[in-house]
């Protein structure tokens, strides 16, 4: 077990190292080079020369990479020139991360609570209308561009019906105390129920749009896994023993069928981060996704740099944890 | 769909008789491809997908001749006002025009061609890259396998669409080619993994051992015996990637990283750039979106039914 964790940890460290090299190369290959990328629109020739000297761009490449790494570890990624002009890029990330975590969690909860029961029911009635219907629905779900779905939801429920707010994270005039910067959680913690409710209403549409990505995949994996497991001998044995349907479902079918689902949930975190770029842009939801969207639009490279690196870091760490959790659940993984 | 079975058969004929024994046939002596085709012919999912794709490809080929207007001509530009930036449907223009006064129907028809080009080239690019890496890893094995697979792991450790965004942002002047390149690169690790996996499974199969025992040199073993038998899952993946590539191209345009030149329309570009009109003129977005959804669904249906038909486990 320990050996598995150590090996997996070393892999993650290696991935991070290569990632930092790639990011360094990416920053140097940007249009106009690193100087104009960091200076943005403020770039006068004098400022460029000063920055060149300051960054030591005439030093050997290894020295430059080392300096880049050192700065990155200190959280010094330069100053934003598009998202929040003049603010350190690192602060943009720190301020906006809670919003995206909150959105992703709500989206994942929606996807899981719908996809797992639906996958189970569809598998039990394989070939029935509910099964066929939900399989077709999940295939269409994959085919719809997520930002288009977001616009459709916004058009129907915010613009036409006016049931939910069309954009942002909180209504104007809501006076809320912020502790974690996850607005709904803050409202619940401080018992400002109106603020929590308001934050929740702002979350629904973007979260539903975002949940369409993991929903389709979790549904199909659950369905396929349940179909496989139901044919296993131990399920037949359990039935022959006269166990109740409930015990068979909980202890024999779902416990085994959920193993592949756990892995997929980890892998979907990455898709969720990329999907957040698109949905947060549609709903002007102030998370790291929207910052990335604005960053790409205005070529705010200092912000892009920190956000891409942190997104990859989060993804690597989450999958590391998933793999370890997987090894705990399923002993066969360790010895592979 | 005879084109699918034929390459398999021809390759099969070329493989020497010893190697053939364990290659493509099962107990009943029916080749994997032929048995798959037998099932696909009666599979409604596959047929619906195939009809959609056939219609799409035909439209892509003949669109310039049947489109009622030049897709780049700003014919209704005079009708465009600040209150109403999108001219509506009228005689000769059944779907109205876009925000530059160009005929929507013609743009959708001609757009099929660019959409197909972007999808196919991005998929082929990813396939080619994955083929090189997968063949090195699966064919040589050992240290080459370790190095290549570590590279692939790192590529997979970055969320793929985010990587496409970052790659596209590297170019000062985005174009159709930067879009294709960005989408192709993110597909490489997936293809490489697939190909390596199925080649690894071949390494110890009877026909490869037989060829080795006959003294066939390593390179011909890889290219003539292992590779042709490994392409099944890769073709399935390619079909699914085509759908993803078309959707991803739309996402790139939506973020302003797509092809800015819209004289040759592409559906993803049309959808990506329609955002400012969505709340007032949703039809500008809905038309290309519906096209994308239908075609992406077609490729997905076809890929899924191919996957099921080629999966030996599901053969009954």
Image (cartoon, coloured by chain):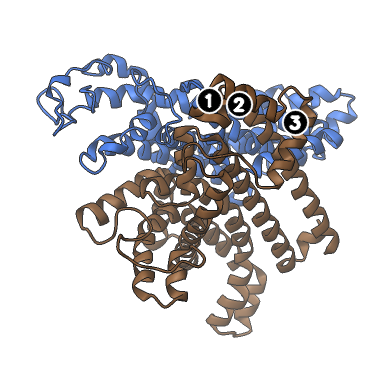
Chain colours: A brown, B blue
The residue drawn where x is 31% and y is 38% is B275
Q: Nearer the viewer, mark 2 or mark 1?
A: 1
Q: Position of residue A293 (x, y in %)?
A: 46, 40
Is the residue under label 1 in contact with that under label 2 (CB below 8 Å)? yes
- In the displayed structure image, the side of residue A190 where residue A323 appears, left or right: right
Residue depicted at 59% across the width and 85% down the height = A242
Q: Earlier in the sequence, mark 3 or mark 2?
A: 2
Which is more toward the observer, A57 or A146? A57
* First-in-chain label (2 vs 1): 2
| Residue sitting at x 35%, y 44% | A148
**Label 2 SS:** helix
Compare residues B2 and A262 and report the one nearer the observer.
A262
Residue indicated by mark 3:
A64
Q: Which mark is residue A43?
A: 1
Q: Chain of mark 2?
A: A
Q: Nearer the viewer, residue A231 or B108?
A: B108
For mark 1, give the secondary structure: loop
Query: Which chain does the numbered disc 3 sit on?
Result: A
* Residue B153 visible in rendering: no
Dot 1, crowdedness within 10 Å: few (<14), some or many (≥20)? some
Q: Note whether A270 is above or below B7 in the view shown.
A: below
């Amino acid at each position: 077990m320990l050996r598995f964790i150590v090996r997996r940890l070393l892999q993650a460290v290696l991935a991070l190292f290569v990632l930092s090299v790639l990011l360094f190369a990416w920053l140097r290959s940007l249009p106009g080079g690193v100087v104009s990328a960091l200076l943005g629109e403020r770039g006068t020739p004098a400022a460029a020369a000063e920055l060149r000297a300051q960054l030591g761009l005439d030093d050997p490449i290894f020295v430059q990479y080392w300096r880049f790494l050192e700065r990155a570890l200190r959280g010094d990624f330069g100053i934003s020139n598009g998202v929040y002009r003049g603010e350190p890029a690192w602060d943009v990330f720190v301020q906006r991360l809670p919003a995206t975590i909150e959105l992703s969690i709500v989206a994942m909860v929606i996807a899981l609570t719908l996809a797992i029961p639906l996958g189970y029911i569809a598998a039990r009635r394989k070939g029935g209308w509910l099964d066929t219907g939900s399989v077709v629905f999940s295939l269409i779900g994959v085919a719809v561009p997520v930002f288009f779905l977001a616009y459709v939801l916004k058009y129907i429920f915010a613009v036409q019906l006016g049931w939910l707010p069309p954009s942002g994270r909180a209504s104007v005039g809501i006076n809320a105390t912020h502790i974690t910067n996850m607005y709904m959680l803050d409202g619940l913690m401080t018992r400002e129920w109106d603020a929590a409710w308001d934050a929740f209403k702002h979350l629904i549409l973007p979260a539903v749009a975002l949940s369409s990505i993991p929903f389709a995949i979790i549904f199909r994996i659950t369905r396929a896994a349940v179909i496989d497991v139901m044919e296993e001998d131990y399920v037949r044995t359990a039935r022959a023993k006269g166990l109740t349907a409930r015990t068979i479902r909980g202890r024999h079918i779902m416990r085994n069928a959920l193993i592949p689902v756990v892995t997929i949930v980890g892998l979907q975190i990455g898709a969720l981060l990329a999907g957040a770029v698109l949905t947060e842009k549609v709903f002007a939801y102030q998370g790291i996704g929207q910052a990335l969207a604005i960053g790409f639009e205005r070529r705010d490279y200092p912000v892009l740099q920190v956000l891409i690196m942190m997104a990859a870091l989060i993804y690597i760490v989450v999958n590391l944890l998933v793999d370890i959790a997987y090894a705990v659940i399923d002993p066969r993984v360790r010895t592979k | 769909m005879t084109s699918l079975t034929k390459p398999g058969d021809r390759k099969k004929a070329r493989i020497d008789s010893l190697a053939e024994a364990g290659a493509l046939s099962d107990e009943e002596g029916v080749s994997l491809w032929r048995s798959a085709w037998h099932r696909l012919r009666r599979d409604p999912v596959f047929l619906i997908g195939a009809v959609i794709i056939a219609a799409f490809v035909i439209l892509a080929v003949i669109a310039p001749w049947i489109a009622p207007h030049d897709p780049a001509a700003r014919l209704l530009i005079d009708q465009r006002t600040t209150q109403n930036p999108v001219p509506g449907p009228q005689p000769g223009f059944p779907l109205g025009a876009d925000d530059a006064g160009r005929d929507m129907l013609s743009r959708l028809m001609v757009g099929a061609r660019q959409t197909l080009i972007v999808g196919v080239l991005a998929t082929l690019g990813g396939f080619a890259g994955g083929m090189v890496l997968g063949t090195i890893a699966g064919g040589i094995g050992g240290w080459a396998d370790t190095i290549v697979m570590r590279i692939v792991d790192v590529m997979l450790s970055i969320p793929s669409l985010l990587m496409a965004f970052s790659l596209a942002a590297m170019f000062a002047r985005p174009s159709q080619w930067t879009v294709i390149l960005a989408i192709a690169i993110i597909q490489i690790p997936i293809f490489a993994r697939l190909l390596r996996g199925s080649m690894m499974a071949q390494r110890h199969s009877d026909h490869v051992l037989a060829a080795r025992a006959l003294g066939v040199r390593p390179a011909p073993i890889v290219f003539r015996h292992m590779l042709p038998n490994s392409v099944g899952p890769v073709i399935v993946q390619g079909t699914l990637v085509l759908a993803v590539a078309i959707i991803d191209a739309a996402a790139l345009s939506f973020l302003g990283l797509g092809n800015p030149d819209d004289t040759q329309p592409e559906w993803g570009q049309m959808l990506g750039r329609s955002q400012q009109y969505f709340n007032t003129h949703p039809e500008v977005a809905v038309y290309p979106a519906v096209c994308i959804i239908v075609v992406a669904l077609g490729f997905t249906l076809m890929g899924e039914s191919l996957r099921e038909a080629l999966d030996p486990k599901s053969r009954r």
